Amino acid sequence: MERFEILISAQQIASRIKEIAAELDETFKEEVPIFIGILNGSFMFMADLLREVNMDCEMDFIKLSSYRGNETSGTVRLLKDISADITGRHVVIVEDIVDSGLTIKFIKDRMMEADPASLTIVSLLHKPDVAKLDFAIDIVGFEISPEFVVGYGLDYDQKFRNFDGIYRLKEGPEDN
């Protein structure tokens, strides 16, 4: 039986999203950026973030797959591409978590091929101890340890996305 322990509360998430929105408002005050959410995990973060920004903007989504259960498969598959033309546009990638870095590197490389005016990467969570990146994440909500987390859009085999906070999975003595 899986147990959950709160790692980041809904209130902490809401507060940090307000700060991120204010930073994006300042960065893009003269622009109309397009926010691109990475499905499925970023949908809650993206919705809450877009409700907090005070700018004209557009949105689109991309869907990729790189996980089975709580393990990365080592490859990224494109399941749904964006429909918008981002050439010459200010693009804000909205990710739920940067873990191994495989997915965000794939997306960054793919978006840069379209020659956007700028590319900003925003991730609610970042695991700096395991991410293998040769570039920085522009805005990080929270840095966390390498443990597996669920909630607020993040899942374990498509379950637990609906939790309002971020929880860590804990194994009980009966699971060992």
Image: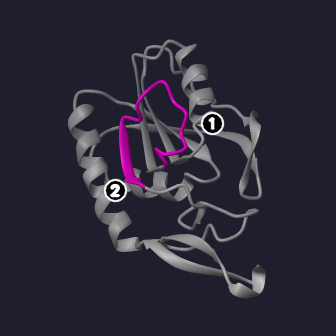
Q: Quadrant of residue 109?
A: top right
- The Cα atoms of the two marked residues, 2 and 1, are separated by 22 Å
Q: Which secondary structure lies at badge 1? A: helix
Q: Is residue 146 rendered to the left or right of residue 55?
A: right
Q: Residue 111 in magenta?
A: no
Q: Residue at x 50, y 73 (%)?
A: 164
Label 2 amino acid? Ile
Judge the density around disc 2: few (<14), some (14-19), many (≥20) Cα neighbours within 10 Å: many
- Picture quadrant of residue 136: top left
In the rendered image, residue 22, in percent from the top left (x then y), is placed at 23, 47
Q: Position of residue 102 (x, y in %)?
A: 63, 34
**First in residue order: circle 2 vs circle 1:** 2
Which residue is located at x 45 percent, y 45 percent? 123
Say which mark, if any, is on residue 87: none
- Report the disc number at residue 17: 2
Q: Quadrant of the C terminus?
A: bottom right
Instruction: State the predominant SS element of the stretch in magenta.
Output: loop
**146 relative to 137 in the view: left or right:** right
Numbered range of the magenta stretch: 127-143
Residue occupying the far bottom of the picture: 174
The reply to whether the magenta stretch includes residue 140 is yes
Q: Nearer the viewer, residue 71 or 56?
A: 71
